[in-house]
Image (cartoon, helix red, strand yellow):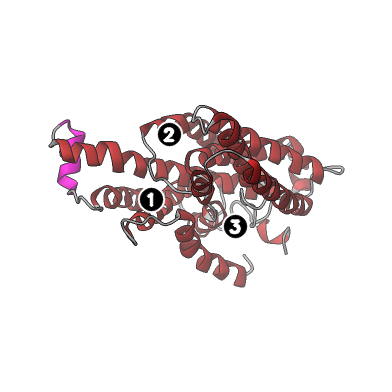
Amino acid sequence: MLNRSVAVSPTAAGRSPGTFVLWLAGAFAVLLAALVLAVTRGSVPVSPAQIVEVLRGGGDDLARTVILDLRLPRALLAAVVGGNLAVAGVLLQSALRNPLGDPHLVGVSAGAGLGAVLAFSFFAGSFAALPLSAFAGALLSAVIVYGLAYREGAQPLRLILAGVALTSLLGAATNALLSVSSAPLPVVMSWLMGGFSGRSWGELEALLPWSVVGLIAALVASRAMNVLALGDELAHGLGLRVERLRLGLLALGAMLAGASVAASGVIGFVGLVVPHVARLTVGAAHERVVPLSWLLGAALLVVADTAARLLLDPTELPVGIFTAALGAPYFLHLLRRRV
């Protein structure tokens, strides 16, 4: 079931270009509405008109502080992280040719988490060290999984099994490090559960270069991913260097997931579910799945973060609770249909 279920033809479920543009515009509208909701709702409510006024350089001091210093950078960061995680899911599912490909499942998130905990322990949570440490952990995990699964080529099922085993090992190493680390445990645990509390423009600026490079590279690789979806033998026959592409997709997915984990902590389910929703909506062609997944992932995480912030205000809940609550029912539906 694992290998067969992801072997979707890039054209079998295709949609017309006009329909794709409409879905893309609809997803962008949903993301824009989610951003407006995130900025306007809170203990100090502001109106959409105030947002426009502040963005044009006006508004009173309170509105400017609430919008520019607190809510807007947080909402935009949630959007970028959600988009990155969704595209990372597309890349990993394509590399593994498996619908269960996800940064969590193949050890990428666990590696990024361990790298970030190392930064907390030895660099006092320095934000300069955090992204590089998390990215290095994610990339190293992807390389280890690939190496463990390689035997005359990296078979998708072996990649999944190696990822599950490495995730468990890295989780144990993270817990062991936390037990002897001098880092403030509540801060580290809050970060490991994922969230955007206290995030500012600095985190967004640090994340954007990774995101832009990753998204452009994913779009460039779309046609090659379409060929890979036809199967290794046929892809080889069409001149595709399958192993080189698979390793590149793993590294690219690790980069996007690692940089996002550094900015937000560990947030699951976005990379697992969103690509399936995009494929069912616009077909399996990756040049369509990648941009729609980014928009849907961004909107999902903005909505989840807004709910986490407001539901028990002033107490803030982990964002991962809401991504699981929103994504798990649909994913179970997919499993029942053996997609």
Q: Can residue 174 be seen?
A: yes
Which residue bears the numbered disc 3? 12
Q: Residues within 10 Å of mark 2 (few under 14, many from 20)?
A: many
Residue type, numbered disc 2 = Glu
Residue 57: which quarter of the image? top left
Q: Where residue 125 sits in the image (x, y, percent)?
A: 52, 34
* Disc 1 to disc 2, C-alpha distance: 16 Å
For image coordinates 18% across by 36% down, the residue present is: 54
The majority secondary structure of the magenta stretch comes to helix
For image coordinates 55% across by 51% down, the residue present is: 271
Residue 291 shown left or right of residue 122 in the figure:
left
* The N terminus - image quarter: bottom right
Q: Can residue 225 be seen?
A: no
* Disc 2 to disc 3, C-alpha distance: 40 Å
Q: Residues within 10 Å of mark 3 (few under 14, many from 20)?
A: few
Tell whether label 3 touches label 2 (CB within 8 Å).
no
Q: Is residue 161 above or below residue 73?
A: below
- The numbered disc on residue 203 is 2
Residue 155 shown left or right of residue 92 in the figure:
right
- The answer to which of marks 1 and 2 sits earlier in the sequence is 2
Residue span colored magenta: 47-57
Residue 46 shown left or right of residue 317 in the figure:
left
- The answer to which of marks 1 and 3 sits earlier in the sequence is 3
- The answer to which of marks 2 and 3 sits earlier in the sequence is 3
Q: Where residue 253 sits in the image (x, y, percent)?
A: 60, 41
SS at circle 1: helix
